[in-house]
Amino acid sequence: MTADAETPDAATPEVARPVPATPASVRPAAPRPGAVASGSDASGSDASGSDAGWGRVEDDGTVSVREGEEWRVVGQYPDGSPQEALAYFERKYADLASEVTLLEVRARRGGASAADLRSTAETLRGRVVDAAAVGDLAALRDRLDALTGTLAEATEAESAAAKEAVEEAVRERTTIVEAAEALAARDPQHVQWKQVSAEMSALFDRWQKHQSDGPRLPRSQSQQLWRRFRDARATVDKHRREFYASLDQTHKAARDAKTRLVERAEALAPRGEEAIGTYRDLLDEWKRAGRAGKKVDDALWARFKAAGDALYGARAEREAADAEASQEKIQAKRALLAEAAPIVDERDLARARSLLTGIQRRWDEVGRIHPRETERSLDDELRKIEQSVRTREDADWKRNNPETKARANDMTRQLTDAIDKLESELADAESRGDARAAAAAREALEARKAWLRAVGG
């Protein structure tokens, strides 16, 4: 079957071959003046003289639809009955009506774009006008006009919301761009590149998600923002590459320097303990050499430390042997300390010094002992006894020093003479009744007496 059901040109009506169909109802078609009405309708009534239906069929199978008071030819169905002809074009109308109903349902349910629905409604209305179908086409047009009006209002609201959404999207994408530009503006030598790279990756993910999920931006704004973001991202990448290139050079220099230090440290092994001082100098150079990267640093440090451990291990072995050999010396010095302890209480200072001198001589003959902490502890104990004797000697010297005695006697004599003179002046002032002179003489007299008592006079 071939039919041009959507051809609006009434001058070229559709020609259709019979299609088996039994419509639910077929309205009678009134004959055109001078035309011979076809048979009867599906109800068995005569089609002639009836104007109640929307379509009619001529004897030659030409089908027309009633639009107001006029009839418009919609096609031909020459090889079938009038009922089949009307049923065919009524199905065309039913298809159009279904599309209108579906469009109304979609508009009521929401979710679809009002602008898209409006465009679909306008397209559908163009198909309804002069449609090759039999039915109340005017009612379909009215429904589409009403739907288009409603969708026009919804389109305006939708457009305003879309504009606001675009403006918000521009603001959000601008925020992403500004954050990227802030990262690009930071000093490459003072940033944590691992953190900065992660932040830039997160910003790029946000950009992609926003571009995918957000509204479509105007092309000029979208390209401008993308260029800014792209340039900031490229700047960060450039700075990161330059930083790591410089860092590689620094690490290489440090690696070479530390490798040489390791080789020098390992060469000290034959010298044993005596090379510890040289190793410490190498350690100072190691600290100044800088970083060579964690893995390289750890590997080189393990070798450098092992070389030092060998030197310190040699010293530890020697000290252990010395400590073992010093056990008898330690016991000897402890015995000397026990012998020296009573010297503190010896009343005869000369005898105390003599005993101490003998012990000190024997102490030195014992010799050095290990470990040094034990030696220092024993020396401190003997030093306390020495300090006690020295303190007593100093006090005795101060008491018996001839020069000190002479000076003390001379001072006593001078103070005694001064006291005698002041007593005479005090008596004379009191006899004269000179209270001021008497007070001055009395004050001076008390001071001289205090000095005399201080020097033992």
Image (spheres, helix red, strand yellow):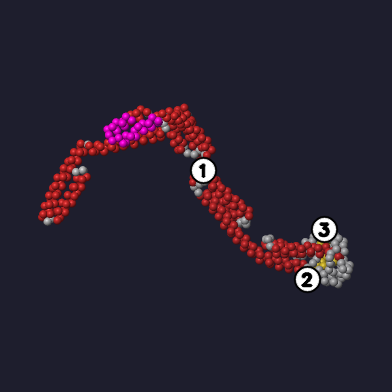
Give the residue number, with chain letter if any, for mark 3: 2
Q: Which of the image's four quarters has the C terminus?
A: top left
* Kind of element beneath mark 3: loop
Q: Residues within 10 Å of mark 1 (few under 14, many from 20)?
A: some
Q: Residue at x 33, y 34 (%)?
A: 342
- In the picture of the structure, the residue carrying the numbered disc 2 is 68
What residue is drawn where x is 51% and y is 35%? Answer: 302
CB atoms of marks 1 and 2 within 8 Å = no
Of callouts 2 and 3, which one flags the residue occurring earlier in the amino acid sequence? Answer: 3
Amino acid type, callout 3: Thr
Do the numbered discs 1 and 3 sit on residues whose CB atoms are within 8 Å?
A: no
x 83%, y 68%: residue: 27
Mark 1 vs mark 3, CA separation in Å: 75 Å
Q: Which residues are magenta?
A: 330-359
Query: Principal SS element in the magenta part?
Result: helix
Q: Which residue is denoted by mark 1 in the rendering? A: 243
